[in-house]
Amino acid sequence: MDKGRQGRARAAVQGSIDWPGTLLNGRPRQRDDLLWHLRSRSPHELWLVIVDASASTRRHQALSDAKGLLAQLFDDAYRQRARLALLTASGRAPNWQVQGLKASKDLRGWLDGLGAGGGTPLLAALAEAGQWLVSRQKRYPAEQQRVLLLTDGRLKSLSPLARLGCPTLLIDIERGPIRLGRARELAQQLDAQYRHIDG
């Protein structure tokens, strides 16, 4: 086992961090909380990241902390050669930043310039993301898809939503003394795992 072409398999505390898997267990507090990818990973993974950057996410440094989490995620996607799709929800309509490309360090520049403002076209973003995932799955049936949604859930109303058809994790970035708690409801409708960014 030690002398194969690739040497001994990595122990469970080495290699690249599985951020989506780690975050499903809550925000890591220590090294032992991290999950690690095995060295041989196939088929390819696609991470679809949907970022709510509406005006409400400016409150209590919610978007700033979310950007720190995204920076870690982008670095991990780059190291793992995962494909990345990035959809932002702010202003009047959702906006694609990247659609299924290999993760690159260029995303750091975009992340630094990401600001919050405007309305919350999150429901439109989720509908568009669902359609895009279906068409992509037809083109790449072996690809493993995952969705990471960062939002404070501050929507005027929650209309019925279709599930996205792949493992989905919602990170709630709502903060402050008065919380609406709609992100948890949104996660239930999407059949998504729910985690608060502080927990």
Image: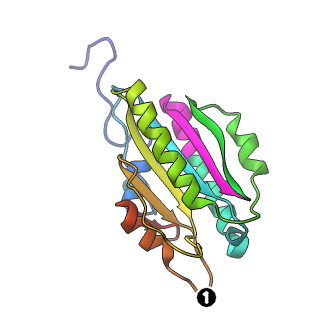
Q: Position of residue 68 (x, y in %)?
A: 63, 55
Looking at the image, which residue sits at the far front?
Answer: 159
> Is residue 69 among the parts visible in the rendering?
no
Q: Which residue sits at x=57%, y=47%?
A: 72
Looking at the image, which residue sits at the far left?
Answer: 1
Q: Position of residue 182 (x, y in %)?
A: 49, 76
Which residues lie in the magenta part? 73-91
Q: Nearer the viewer, residue 106 or 154?
A: 154
Looking at the image, which residue sits at the far top?
Answer: 5
Q: Which residue sits at x=74%, y=43%?
A: 110
Q: Which residue sits at x=49%, y=79%?
A: 181
Q: Position of residue 177 (x, y in %)?
A: 61, 88
Q: Quadrant of the N terminus?
A: top left
> Is residue 125 among the parts visible in the rendering?
yes
Residue occupied by mark 1: 177
Q: Quadrant of residue 117?
A: bottom right
Q: Which residue sits at x=70%, y=75%?
A: 59
Q: Nearer the viewer, residue 32 or 41?
A: 41
Horizontal side of 195 relative to 71 (left or right) equals left
Tag 1's secondary structure? loop
Does 15 sit above or below residue 115? above
Q: Quadrant of residue 155?
A: bottom right
The amino acid on which the numbered mark 1 sits, given as a three-letter code, is Pro
Mark 1 crowdedness (10 Å alpha carbons): few <14, some 14-19, many ≥20: few
> Can residue 80 be found in the magenta stretch?
yes
